[in-house]
Image (cartoon, coloured by chain):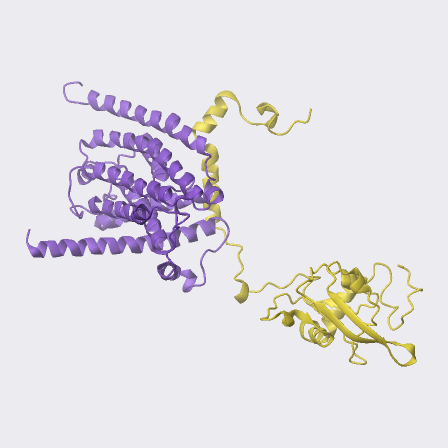
Chain colours: A yellow, B purple
Protein backbone atom coordinates (compact mmCIF):
# COMPACT_ATOMS: atom_id res chain seq x y z
CA UNK A 1 0.00 0.00 0.00
CA UNK A 2 1.18 3.49 -0.79
CA UNK A 3 2.19 5.29 2.40
CA UNK A 4 2.05 9.06 2.59
CA UNK A 5 3.94 11.14 5.13
CA UNK A 6 0.77 11.24 7.19
CA UNK A 7 0.22 7.48 7.33
CA UNK A 8 3.71 6.73 8.56
CA UNK A 9 4.14 6.25 12.32
CA UNK A 10 5.44 9.28 14.17
CA UNK A 11 8.71 7.59 15.21
CA UNK A 12 9.63 6.97 11.59
CA UNK A 13 9.01 10.64 10.75
CA UNK A 14 11.50 11.62 13.43
CA UNK A 15 8.90 13.45 15.52
CA UNK A 16 8.79 13.12 19.29
CA UNK A 17 6.12 10.90 20.81
CA UNK A 18 4.55 10.48 24.21
CA UNK A 19 5.69 12.87 26.90
CA UNK A 20 8.17 14.67 24.64
CA UNK A 21 5.39 15.43 22.13
CA UNK A 22 3.19 16.67 24.96
CA UNK A 23 5.94 18.96 26.22
CA UNK A 24 6.50 20.31 22.74
CA UNK A 25 2.84 21.16 22.33
CA UNK A 26 2.45 22.72 25.76
CA UNK A 27 5.61 24.84 25.53
CA UNK A 28 4.41 26.29 22.19
CA UNK A 29 7.90 25.56 20.87
CA UNK A 30 6.83 25.59 17.24
CA UNK A 31 4.88 28.83 17.54
CA UNK A 32 7.86 30.45 19.28
CA UNK A 33 10.11 29.30 16.45
CA UNK A 34 7.68 30.83 13.99
CA UNK A 35 7.69 34.10 15.93
CA UNK A 36 11.49 34.11 15.94
CA UNK A 37 11.50 33.59 12.18
CA UNK A 38 9.15 36.48 11.44
CA UNK A 39 11.10 38.72 13.83
CA UNK A 40 14.29 37.85 11.97
CA UNK A 41 12.66 38.78 8.68
CA UNK A 42 11.50 42.11 10.09
CA UNK A 43 15.17 43.13 10.21
CA UNK A 44 16.17 41.51 6.92
CA UNK A 45 16.14 43.83 3.89
CA UNK A 46 13.07 43.43 1.71
CA UNK A 47 13.31 41.94 -1.74
CA UNK A 48 10.80 44.36 -3.28
CA UNK A 49 11.95 46.52 -6.20
CA UNK A 50 10.26 49.89 -6.53
CA UNK A 51 9.54 49.16 -10.18
CA UNK A 52 9.17 52.36 -12.20
CA UNK A 53 11.91 54.16 -10.29
CA UNK A 54 14.09 51.11 -9.89
CA UNK A 55 14.29 48.92 -12.97
CA UNK A 56 16.07 45.62 -13.07
CA UNK A 57 18.42 44.85 -15.95
CA UNK A 58 16.62 42.24 -18.06
CA UNK A 59 18.18 38.81 -17.92
CA UNK A 60 20.18 38.02 -21.05
CA UNK A 61 18.03 36.14 -23.55
CA UNK A 62 14.78 37.59 -22.25
CA UNK A 63 11.89 37.72 -24.71
CA UNK A 64 10.17 41.06 -25.11
CA UNK A 65 8.86 43.20 -27.95
CA UNK A 66 9.56 41.88 -31.44
CA UNK A 67 11.82 43.50 -34.01
CA UNK A 68 12.90 42.87 -37.59
CA UNK A 69 16.63 42.84 -38.15
CA UNK A 70 17.76 45.70 -40.38
CA UNK A 71 20.38 44.81 -42.94
CA UNK A 72 23.16 47.33 -42.43
CA UNK A 73 24.07 47.17 -46.10
CA UNK A 74 20.68 47.96 -47.63
CA UNK A 75 18.86 49.45 -44.65
CA UNK A 76 15.97 47.12 -45.40
CA UNK A 77 14.63 44.11 -43.46
CA UNK A 78 16.68 40.93 -43.72
CA UNK A 79 13.45 38.94 -43.91
CA UNK A 80 13.00 37.02 -47.17
CA UNK A 81 9.31 36.31 -46.66
CA UNK A 82 9.56 32.53 -46.27
CA UNK A 83 6.67 32.56 -43.74
CA UNK A 84 8.26 29.92 -41.45
CA UNK A 85 7.73 32.15 -38.42
CA UNK A 86 4.05 32.59 -39.30
CA UNK A 87 3.71 28.84 -39.75
CA UNK A 88 5.32 28.12 -36.36
CA UNK A 89 3.43 30.79 -34.45
CA UNK A 90 1.04 29.00 -32.03
CA UNK A 91 -1.25 32.02 -31.72
CA UNK A 92 -1.16 32.82 -35.44
CA UNK A 93 -0.39 36.45 -34.87
CA UNK A 94 2.17 36.96 -37.65
CA UNK A 95 0.78 38.04 -41.01
CA UNK A 96 3.10 38.14 -44.04
CA UNK A 97 2.22 39.32 -47.53
CA UNK A 98 4.65 38.84 -50.42
CA UNK A 99 4.58 39.37 -54.19
CA UNK A 100 6.72 38.48 -57.14
CA UNK A 101 9.31 41.05 -57.99
CA UNK A 102 11.71 41.42 -60.88
CA UNK A 103 13.74 38.36 -61.85
CA UNK A 104 11.15 36.14 -60.15
CA UNK A 105 12.46 37.21 -56.73
CA UNK A 106 10.23 37.39 -53.69
CA UNK A 107 9.33 40.84 -52.39
CA UNK A 108 8.19 41.36 -48.84
CA UNK A 109 5.23 43.73 -48.97
CA UNK A 110 3.87 43.57 -45.43
CA UNK A 111 5.08 41.93 -42.24
CA UNK A 112 2.74 42.43 -39.30
CA UNK A 113 2.75 41.09 -35.74
CA UNK A 114 -0.37 41.48 -33.62
CA UNK A 115 1.37 41.66 -30.23
CA UNK A 116 -1.92 41.53 -28.33
CA UNK A 117 -2.26 37.92 -29.42
CA UNK A 118 1.41 37.01 -29.02
CA UNK A 119 2.33 34.66 -26.17
CA UNK A 120 6.06 35.52 -26.34
CA UNK A 121 7.09 31.89 -26.82
CA UNK A 122 9.94 32.84 -29.17
CA UNK A 123 9.11 30.11 -31.71
CA UNK A 124 9.20 32.64 -34.55
CA UNK A 125 12.78 33.55 -33.64
CA UNK A 126 13.78 29.91 -33.44
CA UNK A 127 12.08 29.08 -36.71
CA UNK A 128 13.73 31.83 -38.73
CA UNK A 129 16.58 30.33 -40.76
CA UNK A 130 18.03 33.76 -41.47
CA UNK A 131 17.97 35.33 -38.04
CA UNK A 132 15.69 38.06 -39.39
CA UNK A 133 13.11 38.30 -36.63
CA UNK A 134 14.19 38.80 -33.01
CA UNK A 135 12.72 39.63 -29.61
CA UNK A 136 14.18 42.64 -27.81
CA UNK A 137 14.55 43.15 -24.07
CA UNK A 138 11.90 45.89 -24.12
CA UNK A 139 8.77 44.59 -22.39
CA UNK A 140 6.94 47.56 -20.87
CA UNK A 141 4.95 49.08 -23.69
CA UNK A 142 1.45 50.38 -23.59
CA UNK A 143 -1.06 52.18 -25.77
CA UNK A 144 -4.56 53.54 -25.92
CA UNK A 145 -5.85 51.70 -29.00
CA UNK A 146 -5.65 48.25 -30.51
CA UNK A 147 -3.75 49.68 -33.46
CA UNK A 148 -0.93 50.71 -31.15
CA UNK A 149 -0.14 47.02 -30.69
CA UNK A 150 -0.25 46.04 -34.34
CA UNK A 151 3.40 46.24 -35.36
CA UNK A 152 3.98 46.76 -39.08
CA UNK A 153 7.24 46.13 -40.91
CA UNK A 154 8.33 49.75 -40.50
CA UNK A 155 7.59 49.78 -36.80
CA UNK A 156 9.34 46.44 -36.29
CA UNK A 157 12.44 47.79 -38.04
CA UNK A 158 12.23 50.84 -35.82
CA UNK A 159 12.10 48.54 -32.78
CA UNK A 160 15.38 47.02 -33.87
CA UNK A 161 17.02 50.43 -33.98
CA UNK A 162 15.49 51.73 -30.80
CA UNK A 163 15.49 48.76 -28.44
CA UNK A 164 18.36 46.64 -29.67
CA UNK A 165 20.69 48.23 -32.17
CA UNK A 166 23.18 46.47 -34.35
CA UNK A 167 25.66 45.33 -31.71
CA UNK A 168 23.36 44.02 -29.01
CA UNK A 169 20.94 42.44 -31.46
CA UNK A 170 23.73 40.58 -33.24
CA UNK A 171 25.07 39.34 -29.90
CA UNK A 172 21.62 37.94 -29.07
CA UNK A 173 21.45 36.20 -32.42
CA UNK A 174 24.89 34.74 -31.81
CA UNK A 175 24.34 33.70 -28.19
CA UNK A 176 20.75 32.53 -28.01
CA UNK A 177 19.10 32.12 -31.37
CA UNK A 178 21.74 30.58 -33.59
CA UNK A 179 20.55 27.23 -35.00
CA UNK A 180 21.76 24.42 -32.77
CA UNK A 181 24.12 23.19 -35.46
CA UNK A 182 25.62 25.66 -37.86
CA UNK A 183 24.90 29.34 -38.06
CA UNK A 184 23.04 31.80 -40.23
CA UNK A 185 25.35 31.05 -43.15
CA UNK A 186 22.38 30.28 -45.38
CA UNK A 187 21.73 34.00 -45.27
CA UNK A 188 21.04 35.77 -48.54
CA UNK A 189 20.04 32.59 -50.26
CA UNK A 190 16.52 31.22 -50.49
CA UNK A 191 17.91 27.75 -51.09
CA UNK A 192 18.14 25.91 -47.76
CA UNK A 193 19.01 22.45 -49.10
CA UNK A 194 22.63 22.74 -47.88
CA UNK A 195 21.66 23.34 -44.27
CA UNK A 196 22.83 20.62 -41.88
CA UNK A 197 19.94 20.87 -39.44
CA UNK A 198 17.14 20.27 -41.86
CA UNK B 1 -21.85 70.76 37.54
CA UNK B 2 -21.41 74.12 35.96
CA UNK B 3 -21.51 74.89 32.26
CA UNK B 4 -17.74 75.32 32.14
CA UNK B 5 -17.22 71.84 33.54
CA UNK B 6 -19.48 70.40 30.87
CA UNK B 7 -17.68 72.31 28.12
CA UNK B 8 -14.33 71.12 29.45
CA UNK B 9 -15.57 67.54 29.54
CA UNK B 10 -16.83 67.72 25.96
CA UNK B 11 -13.45 69.14 24.92
CA UNK B 12 -11.59 66.30 26.61
CA UNK B 13 -13.90 63.71 25.05
CA UNK B 14 -13.55 65.26 21.58
CA UNK B 15 -9.76 65.31 21.97
CA UNK B 16 -9.66 61.67 23.03
CA UNK B 17 -11.90 60.56 20.15
CA UNK B 18 -9.77 62.50 17.67
CA UNK B 19 -6.61 60.96 19.10
CA UNK B 20 -8.18 57.51 18.91
CA UNK B 21 -9.16 57.98 15.28
CA UNK B 22 -5.65 59.18 14.49
CA UNK B 23 -4.34 56.15 16.33
CA UNK B 24 -6.57 53.90 14.22
CA UNK B 25 -5.34 55.46 10.96
CA UNK B 26 -1.71 55.04 11.90
CA UNK B 27 -2.17 51.63 13.52
CA UNK B 28 -3.33 50.44 10.08
CA UNK B 29 -0.21 51.97 8.52
CA UNK B 30 1.99 50.47 11.27
CA UNK B 31 0.41 47.07 10.74
CA UNK B 32 0.85 47.16 6.98
CA UNK B 33 4.50 48.13 7.38
CA UNK B 34 5.31 45.55 10.07
CA UNK B 35 3.55 42.68 8.32
CA UNK B 36 5.06 43.66 4.96
CA UNK B 37 8.62 43.71 6.31
CA UNK B 38 8.07 40.39 8.09
CA UNK B 39 7.09 38.95 4.70
CA UNK B 40 10.06 40.47 2.87
CA UNK B 41 7.99 43.24 1.26
CA UNK B 42 8.02 47.01 1.75
CA UNK B 43 4.36 47.86 2.31
CA UNK B 44 2.99 51.28 1.34
CA UNK B 45 5.73 53.39 -0.25
CA UNK B 46 4.08 55.76 -2.72
CA UNK B 47 1.97 58.29 -0.82
CA UNK B 48 4.41 60.55 0.97
CA UNK B 49 7.86 59.46 2.14
CA UNK B 50 7.70 55.72 2.88
CA UNK B 51 3.95 55.90 2.35
CA UNK B 52 3.49 57.93 5.50
CA UNK B 53 0.40 59.72 4.14
CA UNK B 54 -1.25 56.47 3.02
CA UNK B 55 -3.79 56.43 5.90
CA UNK B 56 -4.97 59.92 4.92
CA UNK B 57 -5.35 58.90 1.28
CA UNK B 58 -7.25 55.79 2.38
CA UNK B 59 -9.47 57.85 4.66
CA UNK B 60 -10.37 60.30 1.90
CA UNK B 61 -11.03 57.44 -0.48
CA UNK B 62 -13.32 55.64 2.00
CA UNK B 63 -15.17 58.87 2.76
CA UNK B 64 -16.12 59.45 -0.87
CA UNK B 65 -17.03 55.87 -1.73
CA UNK B 66 -20.56 55.09 -2.75
CA UNK B 67 -22.68 53.92 0.17
CA UNK B 68 -24.20 50.71 -1.16
CA UNK B 69 -27.06 49.15 0.79
CA UNK B 70 -28.25 45.70 -0.32
CA UNK B 71 -31.90 45.85 -1.41
CA UNK B 72 -32.80 42.86 0.76
CA UNK B 73 -31.02 44.11 3.85
CA UNK B 74 -32.83 44.94 7.05
CA UNK B 75 -32.14 48.67 6.75
CA UNK B 76 -32.57 49.86 10.32
CA UNK B 77 -30.29 47.21 11.79
CA UNK B 78 -27.92 47.52 8.85
CA UNK B 79 -27.52 51.22 9.66
CA UNK B 80 -27.16 50.64 13.38
CA UNK B 81 -24.66 47.77 13.42
CA UNK B 82 -21.47 49.72 12.58
CA UNK B 83 -22.54 52.47 14.94
CA UNK B 84 -22.91 49.96 17.78
CA UNK B 85 -19.46 48.53 17.13
CA UNK B 86 -17.74 51.90 16.83
CA UNK B 87 -19.62 53.33 19.81
CA UNK B 88 -18.69 50.41 22.05
CA UNK B 89 -15.03 50.65 21.09
CA UNK B 90 -14.80 54.42 21.52
CA UNK B 91 -16.83 54.51 24.74
CA UNK B 92 -14.40 52.08 26.36
CA UNK B 93 -11.65 54.71 26.14
CA UNK B 94 -13.53 56.70 28.78
CA UNK B 95 -12.30 54.65 31.73
CA UNK B 96 -8.74 53.91 30.65
CA UNK B 97 -6.32 55.47 33.17
CA UNK B 98 -3.61 56.87 30.91
CA UNK B 99 -1.61 58.28 33.78
CA UNK B 100 -1.95 58.67 37.53
CA UNK B 101 -5.17 60.57 38.18
CA UNK B 102 -6.30 60.87 34.57
CA UNK B 103 -9.23 59.06 33.05
CA UNK B 104 -12.15 60.74 31.30
CA UNK B 105 -14.49 59.07 33.74
CA UNK B 106 -13.59 57.62 37.16
CA UNK B 107 -15.91 54.73 37.87
CA UNK B 108 -15.10 52.00 40.34
CA UNK B 109 -16.29 49.16 38.07
CA UNK B 110 -14.06 50.13 35.15
CA UNK B 111 -13.01 46.55 34.45
CA UNK B 112 -16.60 45.29 34.22
CA UNK B 113 -17.52 48.32 32.11
CA UNK B 114 -14.86 47.53 29.51
CA UNK B 115 -15.76 43.83 29.42
CA UNK B 116 -19.45 44.70 29.04
CA UNK B 117 -18.79 47.17 26.22
CA UNK B 118 -16.58 44.72 24.36
CA UNK B 119 -19.54 42.31 24.38
CA UNK B 120 -21.80 45.06 23.07
CA UNK B 121 -19.27 45.60 20.27
CA UNK B 122 -19.72 41.94 19.29
CA UNK B 123 -23.44 42.70 18.85
CA UNK B 124 -22.51 45.14 16.10
CA UNK B 125 -20.63 42.38 14.30
CA UNK B 126 -23.43 39.83 14.73
CA UNK B 127 -26.25 42.21 13.77
CA UNK B 128 -24.28 43.65 10.85
CA UNK B 129 -23.72 40.22 9.35
CA UNK B 130 -27.27 39.10 9.98
CA UNK B 131 -29.02 42.18 8.62
CA UNK B 132 -26.93 42.16 5.40
CA UNK B 133 -28.99 39.19 4.20
CA UNK B 134 -25.99 37.64 2.49
CA UNK B 135 -24.78 34.12 3.16
CA UNK B 136 -21.15 35.08 3.65
CA UNK B 137 -21.98 37.88 6.05
CA UNK B 138 -24.41 35.61 7.87
CA UNK B 139 -21.83 32.83 8.28
CA UNK B 140 -19.35 35.40 9.56
CA UNK B 141 -21.77 36.73 12.14
CA UNK B 142 -22.69 33.22 13.31
CA UNK B 143 -19.02 32.46 13.79
CA UNK B 144 -18.64 35.69 15.69
CA UNK B 145 -21.49 34.75 18.03
CA UNK B 146 -19.99 31.35 18.80
CA UNK B 147 -16.52 32.85 19.20
CA UNK B 148 -17.71 35.54 21.60
CA UNK B 149 -19.40 32.97 23.83
CA UNK B 150 -16.30 30.78 24.00
CA UNK B 151 -13.78 33.53 24.56
CA UNK B 152 -15.63 35.97 26.75
CA UNK B 153 -15.78 33.39 29.54
CA UNK B 154 -12.05 32.70 29.36
CA UNK B 155 -11.31 36.42 29.25
CA UNK B 156 -13.50 37.26 32.24
CA UNK B 157 -12.03 34.39 34.23
CA UNK B 158 -8.46 35.33 33.42
CA UNK B 159 -9.08 38.75 34.96
CA UNK B 160 -10.53 37.36 38.19
CA UNK B 161 -7.02 36.59 39.44
CA UNK B 162 -6.14 40.26 38.97
CA UNK B 163 -9.28 41.37 40.81
CA UNK B 164 -8.40 38.99 43.67
CA UNK B 165 -4.88 40.41 43.95
CA UNK B 166 -5.88 44.07 43.70
CA UNK B 167 -9.11 43.68 45.65
CA UNK B 168 -10.89 46.06 43.28
CA UNK B 169 -12.41 46.40 39.82
CA UNK B 170 -11.36 50.05 39.62
CA UNK B 171 -8.70 50.31 36.94
CA UNK B 172 -6.71 53.04 38.73
CA UNK B 173 -6.69 51.00 41.96
CA UNK B 174 -5.50 47.94 40.04
CA UNK B 175 -2.60 49.95 38.61
CA UNK B 176 -1.71 51.37 42.05
CA UNK B 177 -1.67 47.83 43.47
CA UNK B 178 1.15 47.07 41.00
CA UNK B 179 3.58 49.73 42.24
CA UNK B 180 5.98 47.02 43.54
CA UNK B 181 5.76 44.49 40.73
CA UNK B 182 3.45 44.07 37.71
CA UNK B 183 0.78 41.39 38.05
CA UNK B 184 2.17 39.55 35.04
CA UNK B 185 4.65 37.84 37.39
CA UNK B 186 2.16 36.07 39.68
CA UNK B 187 -0.54 35.99 36.99
CA UNK B 188 1.48 34.80 33.98
CA UNK B 189 -1.14 32.14 33.27
CA UNK B 190 -3.93 34.69 33.42
CA UNK B 191 -1.92 37.03 31.18
CA UNK B 192 -1.46 34.32 28.56
CA UNK B 193 -5.15 33.39 28.57
CA UNK B 194 -6.14 37.06 28.46
CA UNK B 195 -3.89 37.81 25.49
CA UNK B 196 -5.26 34.88 23.48
CA UNK B 197 -8.86 35.68 24.40
CA UNK B 198 -8.28 39.33 23.48
CA UNK B 199 -7.10 38.31 20.02
CA UNK B 200 -10.27 36.26 19.57
CA UNK B 201 -12.39 39.06 21.02
CA UNK B 202 -11.08 41.59 18.52
CA UNK B 203 -11.36 39.14 15.58
CA UNK B 204 -7.68 39.30 14.80
CA UNK B 205 -5.58 36.62 13.17
CA UNK B 206 -5.20 33.73 13.92
CA UNK B 207 -8.75 33.91 15.29
CA UNK B 208 -10.29 36.12 12.60
CA UNK B 209 -12.94 33.59 11.64
CA UNK B 210 -15.79 36.14 11.42
CA UNK B 211 -13.79 37.93 8.69
CA UNK B 212 -11.87 35.03 7.12
CA UNK B 213 -11.15 36.67 3.74
CA UNK B 214 -10.12 33.39 2.15
CA UNK B 215 -13.36 31.62 3.01
CA UNK B 216 -16.09 34.24 3.51
CA UNK B 217 -15.13 37.14 1.19
CA UNK B 218 -14.94 39.53 4.15
CA UNK B 219 -17.29 37.82 6.60
CA UNK B 220 -19.62 40.13 8.47
CA UNK B 221 -18.57 43.25 6.57
CA UNK B 222 -18.95 41.78 3.09
CA UNK B 223 -21.91 44.03 2.21
CA UNK B 224 -20.58 47.18 3.84
CA UNK B 225 -19.00 49.98 1.85
CA UNK B 226 -17.54 53.42 2.34
CA UNK B 227 -18.09 55.10 5.63
CA UNK B 228 -19.96 52.26 7.34
CA UNK B 229 -17.14 49.91 6.41
CA UNK B 230 -14.63 52.32 7.91
CA UNK B 231 -16.69 52.48 11.12
CA UNK B 232 -16.21 48.73 11.50
CA UNK B 233 -12.53 49.28 10.81
CA UNK B 234 -12.35 51.93 13.50
CA UNK B 235 -14.07 49.52 15.88
CA UNK B 236 -11.57 46.75 15.15
CA UNK B 237 -8.46 48.86 15.64
CA UNK B 238 -9.85 50.82 18.57
CA UNK B 239 -10.87 47.48 20.10
CA UNK B 240 -7.31 46.28 19.69
CA UNK B 241 -6.11 49.40 21.45
CA UNK B 242 -8.61 48.92 24.29
CA UNK B 243 -7.64 45.28 24.80
CA UNK B 244 -3.94 46.20 24.82
CA UNK B 245 -4.69 49.01 27.29
CA UNK B 246 -6.63 46.60 29.50
CA UNK B 247 -3.75 44.11 29.43
CA UNK B 248 -1.37 46.95 30.30
CA UNK B 249 -3.54 48.09 33.19
CA UNK B 250 -4.24 44.64 34.59
CA UNK B 251 -0.96 42.82 34.02
CA UNK B 252 1.86 45.13 32.98
CA UNK B 253 1.60 47.80 35.66
CA UNK B 254 -0.15 50.59 33.73
CA UNK B 255 1.66 53.91 34.05
CA UNK B 256 4.38 52.51 36.35
CA UNK B 257 7.87 52.32 34.89
CA UNK B 258 11.29 51.35 36.24
CA UNK B 259 11.90 53.42 39.36
CA UNK B 260 15.59 54.27 39.08
CA UNK B 261 18.05 56.58 37.34
CA UNK B 262 16.63 58.58 34.41
CA UNK B 263 13.63 56.27 34.00
CA UNK B 264 12.00 57.66 37.14
CA UNK B 265 11.75 61.07 35.42
CA UNK B 266 9.78 59.75 32.41
CA UNK B 267 6.06 60.62 32.73
CA UNK B 268 3.67 57.73 33.34
CA UNK B 269 1.73 58.21 30.11
CA UNK B 270 4.89 57.42 28.12
CA UNK B 271 5.30 54.10 29.90
CA UNK B 272 1.62 53.40 29.42
CA UNK B 273 1.69 54.06 25.68
CA UNK B 274 4.96 52.15 25.25
CA UNK B 275 3.41 49.07 26.82
CA UNK B 276 0.20 49.45 24.82
CA UNK B 277 2.07 49.77 21.53
CA UNK B 278 4.30 46.85 22.47
CA UNK B 279 1.17 44.74 22.79
CA UNK B 280 -0.30 46.15 19.56
CA UNK B 281 2.95 45.18 17.86
CA UNK B 282 2.53 41.71 19.36
CA UNK B 283 -0.87 41.48 17.64
CA UNK B 284 0.74 42.31 14.28
CA UNK B 285 3.61 39.93 14.96
CA UNK B 286 1.20 37.06 15.68
CA UNK B 287 -0.75 37.96 12.55
CA UNK B 288 2.34 37.74 10.37
CA UNK B 289 3.33 34.40 11.90
CA UNK B 290 0.32 32.16 12.37
CA UNK B 291 -2.24 30.90 9.85
CA UNK B 292 -5.94 31.02 10.71
CA UNK B 293 -7.21 28.29 13.04
CA UNK B 294 -9.90 25.93 11.84
CA UNK B 295 -13.32 26.57 13.36
CA UNK B 296 -13.44 23.48 15.60
CA UNK B 297 -9.82 24.05 16.66
CA UNK B 298 -10.78 27.53 17.81
CA UNK B 299 -13.74 26.21 19.80
CA UNK B 300 -11.70 23.37 21.27
CA UNK B 301 -8.94 25.77 22.28
CA UNK B 302 -11.41 28.08 23.98
CA UNK B 303 -13.43 25.51 25.89
CA UNK B 304 -10.87 22.78 26.53
CA UNK B 305 -7.68 24.77 27.10
CA UNK B 306 -8.24 28.41 27.99
CA UNK B 307 -11.23 28.05 30.31
CA UNK B 308 -9.64 25.22 32.40
CA UNK B 309 -6.38 27.20 32.50
CA UNK B 310 -8.23 30.29 33.71
CA UNK B 311 -10.02 28.20 36.37
CA UNK B 312 -6.71 26.75 37.53
CA UNK B 313 -5.35 30.26 37.75
CA UNK B 314 -8.31 31.42 39.87
CA UNK B 315 -8.00 28.41 42.20
CA UNK B 316 -4.26 28.85 42.77
CA UNK B 317 -4.53 32.63 43.20
CA UNK B 318 -7.42 32.20 45.64
CA UNK B 319 -5.56 29.60 47.69
CA UNK B 320 -2.43 31.74 47.89
CA UNK B 321 -4.51 34.77 48.81
CA UNK B 322 -6.34 32.90 51.60
CA UNK B 323 -3.11 31.38 52.92
CA UNK B 324 -1.45 34.79 53.09
CA UNK B 325 -4.33 36.47 54.94
CA UNK B 326 -3.30 37.63 58.43
CA UNK B 327 -4.21 34.97 60.98
CA UNK B 328 -3.88 32.09 58.52
CA UNK B 329 -0.05 32.29 58.58
Q: Position of residue B260 (x, y in %)?
A: 23, 45
Nearest to the observer: residue B154 or residue B61: B61
- Toward the left, the furthest residue is B2
Q: Is residue B321 visible?
A: yes
Question: Could you tell whether A30 is left or right of B67 in the image?
Answer: right
Residue B64: image location, x then y, percent:
36, 61
Look at 20% across and 32% down and name the residue there: B166
Q: Nearer the viewer, residue B325 or B146?
A: B146
- Residue B141: image quadrant is top left
Q: Residue at x 48, y 37 (%)?
A: A33
> From where the camera sits, is residue B202 visible?
no
Report the label total: 0
- B193 on left or right of B263: right
Image coords of residue A157 (percent x, y): 73, 75
* Nearest to the observer: residue A29 or residue B160: B160
Q: Residue at x 78, y 78 (%)?
A: A76
Above or below, B269 against A8 in this view is below
* Residue B90 coordinates in the image, percent (x, y): 26, 48
Farthest residue to the top: give it. B328
Q: Residue furthest front?
A: B72
Look at the image and tell me in which quarter the C terminus of chain B lies.
top left
* Residue A47, image quadrant: bottom right
Amino acid sequence: MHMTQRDRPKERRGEPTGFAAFLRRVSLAEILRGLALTMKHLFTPSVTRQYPSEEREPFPGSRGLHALVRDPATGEAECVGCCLCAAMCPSKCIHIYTSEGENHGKVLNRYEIDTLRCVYCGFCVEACPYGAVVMTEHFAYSGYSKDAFLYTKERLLENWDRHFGEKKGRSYLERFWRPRRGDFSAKRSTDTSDREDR
Amino acid sequence: MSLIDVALMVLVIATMITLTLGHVAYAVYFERKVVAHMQGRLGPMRVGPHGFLQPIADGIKLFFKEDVIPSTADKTIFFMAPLISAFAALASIAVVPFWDGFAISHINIGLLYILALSSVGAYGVILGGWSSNSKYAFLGSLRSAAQVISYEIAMGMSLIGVILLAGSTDLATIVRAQSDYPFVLPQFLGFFVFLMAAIAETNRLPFDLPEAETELVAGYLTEYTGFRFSLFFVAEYAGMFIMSALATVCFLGGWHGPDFWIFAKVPGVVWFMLKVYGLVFFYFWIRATLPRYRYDQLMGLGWKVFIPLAMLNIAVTGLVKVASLPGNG
